[in-house]
Amino acid sequence: MNLPKLYEDRMKNMLGSEYADYEASLAEPFIHGLRVNTKKISVEDFLKISPFELEPVPWCENGFYILDEKRPSKHPYYFAGLYYLQEPSAMIPAALMPIDPGDKVIDICAAPGGKSTELGAKLNGSGFLLSNDISASRAKALLKNLEVFGIGNMAVSSESVNVLADRFPCFFDKILIDAPCSGEGMFRKSSSMITAWERNGVELFVGLQKSILKDAVKMLAPGGVMIYSTCTFSPEEDEQSIEYLLSLDDSLSLCELPLFDGFVPGKPEWGESQNVELSKTRRLFPHKLRGEGHFVAMVKKSENADDGFVGVNPYRFKSAKLSSEAKEFFKSVKIDLDLKRIESFGGRLYYIGKDAPDVGGLRLLRNGLLLGEEKKNRFEPSEALAMALKVDEFDNVLDLPADDIRVTKYLKGETIEGEGNNGYILICVDGYPLGFGKLNKGIVKNKYLPGWRMN
């Protein structure tokens, strides 16, 4: 691998005698992993049906290395949202986040959704998740991944952090910042990361990180926890960014993180203040473990912090007047659905969770769970609703084994044969929903979302 001379010299200075091992690790293959969606299936149950050869990732209870050559992105279980494909080191920030039931959580730089999907799974339907990415195009992929995971107690926004900070002062119990960075830890994954490093360097991202941290810290509630992570080795973006964060608020303190095999304590000598507390942060190097380069730190805000918090308005409901067709459809849905919490925008119906704050005026891609759309004389349920259901939560189900050719045909958008009652039917694979179809006399008209279909 042709590394930039400036980068090479700095890494030699940082790693000393270990540099040769680091350089050799760059020639090794990129490591692939998957993370089980514990909102839909337990790790134990997934391992019973897993078609892949897997090995546990030590720092993530529901994370695994993929050891075989199969294509997990083409398996029906992937489309059923039973797992997320994620590089193992990238699992660490969300794995460490201590989510409690009812927490209000924000993932600030969330696309494409690797961390948000895990945070949403940990909430398991309680509390509220705001997943934000300033790039509207990247936020679309984020939204899809959250919906595939069956997460409905969320909103997806595309806002700058300063706008969110003004809107949610001292509001969030948990904040995750997987910050934009120079990407040095991902050189093995893609040579384009080296090209980007040569073009942008480190200084551009240091400024971005400080801007994000300055505003993000304003949103942390007393007693709340913030996790900051990067996929780079630069001290300016790692230890020195944490020094800057701590300087913003005297009520913040670093939390000691686990030292899994291969993890390296943060380096106080690489900071500017020589703060020994920086050793509580963690560095991941590819020559020391099976994963890419990463940095992670956790800070906690004092329970007694006095920030003059004045509160955030709860969501202001405008309950929809439902059509008779929508009401009839919802009779088939066997979940606790409070019809007063359904709102209508342009004929589309959304279910808003009880812990949702007021998000009006933000640049939103989604607020709540999209239930479906009211059209003339009919109601069409959404793919998001299908993915949020369990197999026993809908009256009319066609459950197919993973090796049934009809599963692949359905995922490709084709008409299939099936049995059941005429009308909407929930198509499942081995007991896990894929989407809706409409059954009439043994033929299922495909309702799988075109943008989600298998190529």
Image: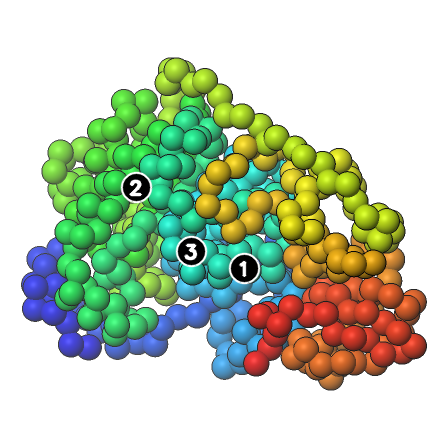
The quadrant holding residue 197 is bottom left
Q: What SS does tag 1 mark?
A: helix
State the count of labels: 3
Residue 51 percent location from the top left of the image: 62, 75
Q: Residue at x 65, y 57 (%)?
A: 384
Closer to the camera, 149 or 280?
149
Find numbered disc 3 in the image and state the secondary structure of the residue it sits on: helix
* Horizontal side, residue 329 vs residue 77: left or right: right
Which is more foreground, mark 3 or mark 1? 3
Using the numbered discs, state the Cα–Cα distance from disc 1 to disc 2 in whole angstroms: 24 Å
On the image, the x and y values in percent for residue 10 come to 10, 59
Which is nearer the N-term, disc 1 or disc 2?
1
Q: Is residue 168 visible?
A: yes
Mark 3–mark 1 CB contact (< 8 Å):
no
Residue 336: image tag: none
Seen in the image, is 62 located left or right of residue 425? Answer: left
Going by the numbered disc 2, the residue's amino acid type is Ile
Q: Nearer the viewer, residue 56 or 51?
A: 51
Q: Give me the C-alpha separation between circle 3 and circle 2.
A: 17 Å
Residue 381 position (above or below residue 366): below
| Residue matched to label 3 | 136
Direction from residue 59 to residue 11 in the image, left or right: left
Q: Earlier in the sequence, mark 3 or mark 2?
A: 3
Q: Amino acid at mark 3?
A: Ala
Q: Identify which amino acid the numbered label 1 is placed on.
A: Asn
Q: Which residue is mark 1?
A: 145
What crowding class fits label 3: few (fewer than 14 Cα within 10 Å), some (14-19), or many (20 or more)?
some
The CA distance from mark 3 to mark 1 is 15 Å
Location of residue 210 (image quadrant) = top left
The residue carrying mark 2 is: 212
Image vertical order of residue 45 relative to residue 278, above or below: below
* Mark 1 crowd level (few <14, some 14–19, many ≥20, 10 Å Cα): many
